[in-house]
Image: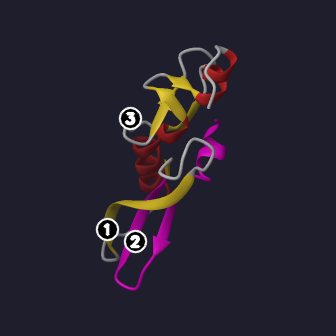
C-alpha cells in the first residue's frame, strides 16, 4: 500500500472544538467472509492547536507505522491494515497462496 493509498485509511474529522484523527479498523466478527470496517478515533487535538501541513504529515506517518493498525507482509513487503493479516506478518493474499482456506 502506497502512502497515497494509506490516506484512504487515515482521516481527520473536523469537529466544532477539536480535530479527530481516525484509522480504519477491520474486524471479522461475522465470519471469515464478512469483514466489518469502522473508523477508530486514535487522537483528539483541540482546535486551539494550529495544525500545519508538516504536523499533519508527521501524525499521518506515525499512525501509518503504528503496529496496532498497520503491518508489512513478510512475503510481499506491502503495508496493509492489521485486520487483513492472518498472522502478525502475513497478509491474507499471501496466506491464500500458501494454502490457507478462508
Q: Position of residue 10 (x, y in %)?
A: 52, 54
Asked if labels 2 and 3 touch by Cβ distance under 8 angstroms, the answer is no
In this view, the residue farthest toward the bottom is 16
Question: Disc 2 designates what residue?
Answer: 19
Discs 3/2, front: 3
The residue located at (43%, 36%) in the rendering is: 65
Q: Nearer the viewer, residue 30 or 2?
A: 30
Discs 3/1, front: 3
> Quick check: 22 above or below 87?
below
Q: Secondary structure at mark 2?
A: strand
On screen, residue 19 versus residue 95, left or right, reads left
Q: Secondary structure at mark 3?
A: loop
Q: Position of residue 6 (x, y in %)?
A: 59, 45
Q: Nearer the viewer, residue 14 or 70?
A: 70
Question: Disc 1 designates what residue?
Answer: 45
Q: How is the image coloured?
A: secondary structure
Mark 3 and mark 1 lie on one chain; the one further toward the N terminus is 1
Question: Disc 3 designates what residue?
Answer: 67
- Asked if the stretch drawn in magenta spans residue 24, the answer is yes
Amino acid at each position: 500500500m502506497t502512502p497515497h493509498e494509506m490516506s484512504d485509511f487515515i482521516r481527520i474529522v473536523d469537529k466544532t472544538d477539536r480535530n479527530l484523527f481516525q484509522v480504519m479498523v477491520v474486524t471479522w466478527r461475522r465470519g471469515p467472509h464478512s469483514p466489518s470496517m469502522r473508523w477508530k478515533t486514535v487522537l483528539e487535538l483541540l482546535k486551539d492547536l494550529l495544525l500545519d501541513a508538516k504536523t499533519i504529515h508527521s501524525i499521518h506517518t506515525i499512525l501509518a507505522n503504528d503496529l496496532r493498525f498497520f503491518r508489512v507482509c513478510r512475503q510481499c513487503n506491502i503495508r496493509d491494515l492489521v485486520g487483513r493479516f492472518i498472522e502478525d506478518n502475513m497478509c491474507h493474499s499471501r496466506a491464500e497462496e500458501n494454502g490457507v482456506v478462508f
